[in-house]
Amino acid sequence: MSPHRYAVGQNVEFVPRRFDGNVPRGTYTVVRQLPGPPNDREYRVKHLQDGHERIVLESQLRSYPSFPRS
């Protein structure tokens, strides 16, 4: 089983697929790592704007760019 790519507390970008309905794309925070299928981990994530939590696949997430603080 491969390790999770994203850590709890990390901000990620969610990219919905064609049949994901009206789930908003954007910035989410990883709340929990879930086992999921062997070829694609699952995560419980929380949207930063609306506060809703969703379960998504790792393949639907992208690293959120982190900018250095001045």
Image (tube, rainbow, N blue to C red):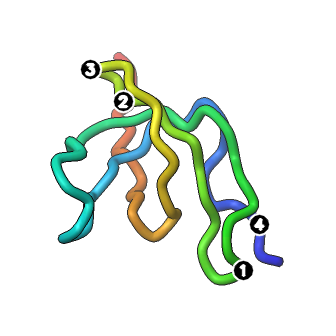
Tell me which label, 3 or 4, sits earlier in the chain. 4
Q: Which residue is mark 2?
A: 47
Q: In the rendered image of this protein, does residue 59 appear above or below residue 20?
A: below
- In front: label 1 or label 4: 1
Comes first in the chain, label 1 or label 3? 1
Q: Which residue is depicted at the point 61% across and 32% down?
A: 31
Give, as a three-letter code, the residue at label 2.
His
Q: Height in image: 33 above or below 16?
A: above
Residue 50 percent location from the top left of the image: 28, 20
Regarding mark 3 in the picture, which secondary structure is present there?
Answer: loop
Asked if disc 1 and disc 2 are in contact, CB closer than 8 Å, the reply is no
Which residue bears the numbered disc 4? 3
Q: CA distance from mark 3 to mark 2?
A: 6 Å
CA gap, disc 3 to disc 4? 28 Å
> Would you say residue 5 is visible in this rendering?
yes
Answer yes or no: do the residues labelled 3 and 2 have beta carbons within 8 Å? Answer: yes
Q: Residue shown at 45%/70% (left/top)?
A: 59
Residue at label 1?
Answer: 38
Could you say which disc has been placed on residue 49 in the image? 3
Task: Count residues near mark 1 (Cα–Cα under 10 Å), then give few for <14, some for 14-19, many for 20+.
Answer: few
Find the distance from the CA under tag 1 to the CA under tag 2: 25 Å
21 or 60: nearer the viewer: 21
What type is the residue that disc 1 sits on? Pro
Secondary structure at numbered mark 1: loop
Camera-side residue of 19 and 57: 19
Between disc 3 and disc 4, the foreground one is 3
The amino acid beneath tag 4 is Pro
Q: Earlier in the sequence, mark 4 or mark 2?
A: 4
